[in-house]
Every structure is written in C-alpha cells, then in structure tokens.
Amino acid sequence: MAETVFSLRNITKIFPNGNRALNGVNLDIAAGECLIIAGSNGSGKTLLMRILAGLSDPTEGEILFKNRPAGQHTRELRSFLGFVFQDADAQMLGETVAEDAAFGPKNLGLSAAGQRAEDSLKAMGLEDKKAYSPRRLSGGEKRRLAVAGVLAMGCETVIMDEPFANLDWPGVVQVLEAIRSLKEAGKTVIILTHELEKVLAMADRLVILDKGHIRGSGRPEEVLDRLKPEYGIRDPRKSYAAAGDCTWLDR
Ligand SMILES: Nc1ncnc2c1ncn2[C@@H]1O[C@H](COP(=O)(O)OP(=O)(O)OP(=O)(O)O)[C@@H](O)[C@H]1O
C-alpha cells in the first residue's frame, strides 16, 4: 500500500454569507496515485484543493501532510505541491517560455533554475518553443507550460483544475500526454473535472463531490455504477445519442 501523502480530515468551509461550500470532507491521497475529483460547477472541487494547498483556510477540519499538520510545513509543501490553475493565462509570468518555466524554481531559491526549466520543458515537449512568448502558445501548450513550471520546482504532486477547459481535441491530447508523463514519472496527480469521459482511463480512483459532500470514492467503474443523476455527472460509458441516457432530463 502506497504511503498516504495528504489527509483531509473533516474539512468544512462556511462562507460569511452562510454558504456551506464543504461539509465534513474526509479524503486521503496516496503517493503516486492518479485521482480524479469530479463534480458539477460549484460542487467544491477547486475550494477543496485550494484548502489542501494552503491557499484558503477551512472553517473546521485538519490537513495532514505526511501525517503532520500541513500548516507547520508550508515551505516544504510549496515545493511539493503544484497547482495548475484553470486559467492558464493567469499563471504565466515570464516573457519567454524558458523564463516562465524557470520562475517557480527561482522563486523557491533552488539552484540551477535554468537547467530545471529546460529539463521540464523537454519532458512536456516544449523544448522547441523556449524562446516564444507564452501568449503565443496554443491552449494545450499553455497548460503543458504550467505543468512544466511545477515540474521545474520538483513538485511531487500536481493538481490540475479543469485541464480540458476551452481546448480543442489536439489540445486535449496534449494535456493527456502531459498527464501520462507525470504518471510515468511516479508523480501524484489530482485532476478536477466534470469532463470525465476525457480522462477516466487515466484514473486509479474516482471521487465524486456534490454540494460539498463526497458521494463516492473508489475504483472508477464501481463509483460510476452508483452515480445518481442529482450529482450532475455524466457516466462516460453511456452514449451521447440515446435520450434514455440523459437521466436528468424530464421525460
Ligand atoms: N467568497 C465566497 N462566498 C460565498 N460562497 C463562495 C465564495 N467563494 C466560493 N464560494 C462558493 O463555494 C462553492 C464551491 O466553489 P468551487 O469553485 O470550489 O466549485 P467547483 O466545484 O470548483 O466549480 P467549477 O467547476 O465551477 O470550478 C460554490 O458554491 C461557490 O459559489
């Protein structure tokens, strides 16, 4: 059994306006697993991962990083956990692709930031675009650049928030290739999405989040067998064509 790297214990988030966005969420994440957290818009996926990354505080609950309270290890956590945000443009900080990939390791004060950037750009198939402005990259390339940036920091865990948003098919394939290389490198990969059909084949485990509650967690097929229409997740094993598959439509 792989080592548990993160444990979220009883995480609850209540906003000042009374919105209970997360309700007693318990989740363990094992080293090297590829976990998909699926949920409809507003189910709490991003918030849960922002809390895991220390970017937002829970109202209640505890986050353990390697069995120790995460708050006491903020620096180690910063270089362990990389977040690829939904808006790839907001994450780009360099004038060139090479500069952008080197930004993270430089910021962490790591040695050989340029070499680290170069290696990670190669791993993401972007070595030919080093001199480009990041703005000139395609959507899929931008996401790969964001992954290269977290790899250059030496992150062992990569969270990807809606990595397929606004991508055409070649872009989707590029991101899937990036996920495959992360898996092959033994990284822990957490993917937040409502587009299960694109990425389910990569998953070791599927977690369903709905209105801030975990409704299922386990082997993808088993979790899908217990999907309820109100979770707002489409079972990717069903066809798009049959009206009978659209269980949430009034018939
Ligand atoms: N400052 C805030 N005040 C009140 N509610 C908030 C605030 N910020 C976020 N929320 C709520 O928290 C809930 C969870 O949002 P979150 O962004 O985590 O959803 P998500 O599952 O990632 O959705 P999406 O797929 O749209 O990105 C939403 O209902 C959102 O409206």
Image: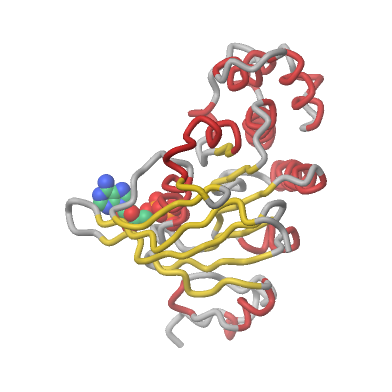
**Residue 134: percent from the left, percent from the top?**
62, 20
Residue sitting at x 50%, y 36%? 87
Q: Is residue 163 left or right of residue 173?
A: left
Q: 51 or 31: nearer the eye?
A: 31
Q: Where is residue 238, by image quadrant?
A: bottom right
Front-most of residues 190 and 3: 3
**Residue sitting nearer the eye, 75 or 114:** 75
Instruction: Give the x, y percent position of residue 119.
Output: 79, 23
The residue under the point 80% across, 42% down is: 185
Quarter of the image where one finds residue 71: top left
Image: 171 above or below 201: above
Q: Residue furthest left?
A: 17
Horizontal relation, residue 1 to residue 41: left or right: right
- Residue at 41%, 39% in the rendered image: 55
Image-based side of 39 in relation to 34, left or right: left
- Picture quarter containing residue 240? bottom right
